Image (tube, coloured by chain):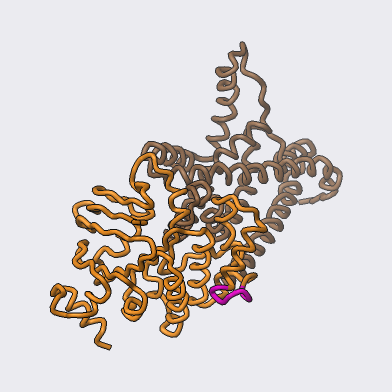
Chain colours: A orange, B brown
Amino acid sequence: MAVIEIRDVSKWYGDFQVLSRCTTTVDKGDVVVVCGPSGSGKSTLIKTVNGLEPFQRGEVLVNGVSVGARGTNLPRLRAKVGMVFQHFELFPHLSITENLTLAQVKVLRRKPSEALAKGMMLLDRVGLSDQAVKYPGELSGGQQQRVAIARALCMDPVVMLFDEPTSALDPEMVSEVLDVMVGLAREGMTMMVVTHEMGFARQVANRVIFMDQGRIVEDTSKEGFFGAPESRSERARQFLSKILQH
Amino acid sequence: MDLDFGVVGGALPYLWKGFRYTVELTVTAAAGGLFFGTLLALARLSSLRSLSLAAAGYVNLMRSVPLVLVIFWFFFLVPLMLQGITGAERPPQVGAERTALLTFVLFEAAYFCEIMRAGIQSIPKGQLHSAYALGLSYAQAMRLVILPQALRNMLPVLLTQVIVLFQDTSLVYVISATDFVGAAAKIAQRDSRLVEMYLFVAIVYFVLCFTLSRLVKRLQSRLAVVR
């Protein structure tokens, strides 16, 4: 069953087209990695899924509900879609536990005690239960990102979106975040991940989407993408050879 | 010149009454101004063009007219407006003190609006996105995520504005409201002790404002460390 359906989506900033007739589907349990050069529209595409980026043409469905339709209750839809950002975006004026419980209490109307229990369970899961009373500014980047993942999981999302979750991290912190994501993927979480971490893609993705200049150039199985080079588009080949050089 | 500061001692109860009104006016105008100023700031930043234009118009008008004129206007206009609303035969008596409260709240709202607008714009857009992504509504995102941070970032500027406001309230003497300066002026004229009274008032203002601004400075450096 499709959790996300992106149908023929186009978006313009004035005259400049950032998304051009993008179509793809993410099924339950899929781990889809979206890659491509910077400015190719990957982040914009993933942000159309929870309505953070409006688009002018096409349709995006999450669990069958249209994101762009007038009558759609966007806050309710977003509560079901977890999102992790490049710059973590924890709320700096709230403690870690408050970050974890805020939306559970205010959006899902859970009891504070229930929300706290859930938050602590997920904080433990990302290995940070000893940091509960701290503030985001007191944590390292990798720790903040793990809290951000726990915060999104607190909402019991049907799908998790990751927008370059490791790009702003120091190299030695990348793996602690990727480990959490690999664990999630292995548990069967449906995920759409914008990343340049090809190791992650090889390890757990079952599909890879390659974008260039606002278009989905390739949408293929992992084996297809990393396997036979001759089956890939010229642009994807160039991109892969550049990022896999080192 | 003979200076006789004995006059100050005798007038203290009356001066104290005036001073309390000054503080009341400052606190009310700061609280009300911050509240309405924040609403105005949200309106100015709204994507609804008519709303943001209306808010901008109000703010620019208030900020382009001298405060003394605004006080005069409200003193004469508020009774007439109330008459129009209630349909009374004669303009109701509002009194200088209450008119001043209303005037200062509405006037300060324009200044607090600009401070809060800058504060809201200082918060990275990702914060709003992540609040939305968690399912918070616009009102929740503002109330729980954006405004607390904006307020904290702008706290030194807001307090400085309150100090300016505290000094500005002395302008209510033009409508004969008895604030601290007004009380002192009345005693000064009654007893012909202008120099003593105005000197005393000036010293009180100086000590208070100087102390407060030192405190703001310390707060500022502490906030800078936290961030």
Q: Nearer the viewer, residue B217 or A150?
A: A150
Q: Which residues are magenta?
A: A125-131
Which quadrant: the C terminus of chain A? Answer: bottom left
Task: Identify which residue is drawn at 55% across, 25% down.
Answer: B77
* Residue A179 on image: x %, y %: 45, 78
* Residue B173 on image: x %, y %: 65, 37
Which quadrant: the N terminus of chain A? Answer: bottom left
Q: Nearer the viewer, residue B33 or B96?
A: B33
Would you place residue A214 above or below residue B80 in this image? below
Count of numbered labels shown in the rendering:
0
Residue A17 seen in render = no
In the picture, measured across the screen, residue A79 lies left or right of residue A55, that is: right
Residue closest to the far front: A1
Name which quarter of the figure residue B101 lies in: top right
Would you place residue A246 above or below residue A152 in this image? below
Taking the magenta stretch, the answer to whether it contains residue B74 is: no
Would you place residue A129 above or below residue B28 in this image? below
Task: Identify which residue is drawn at 64% across, 48% down.
Answer: B166
Name which quarter of the figure residue A132 lies in: bottom right
Residue closest to the far top: B89
Would you place residue A27 above or below residue A69 in this image? below
* Residue A218 on image: x %, y %: 20, 68
Task: Identify which residue is drawn at 32% across, 63% down.
Answer: A43
Name which quarter of the figure residue A136 lies in: bottom right
Q: Nearer the viewer, residue A232 or B66?
A: A232
In the picture, measured across the screen, residue A24 lies left or right of residue B203, that is: left
* Residue A193 on image: x %, y %: 36, 68
Residue A166 seen in render = yes
Task: Identify which residue is drawn at 29% across, 69% down.
Answer: A207
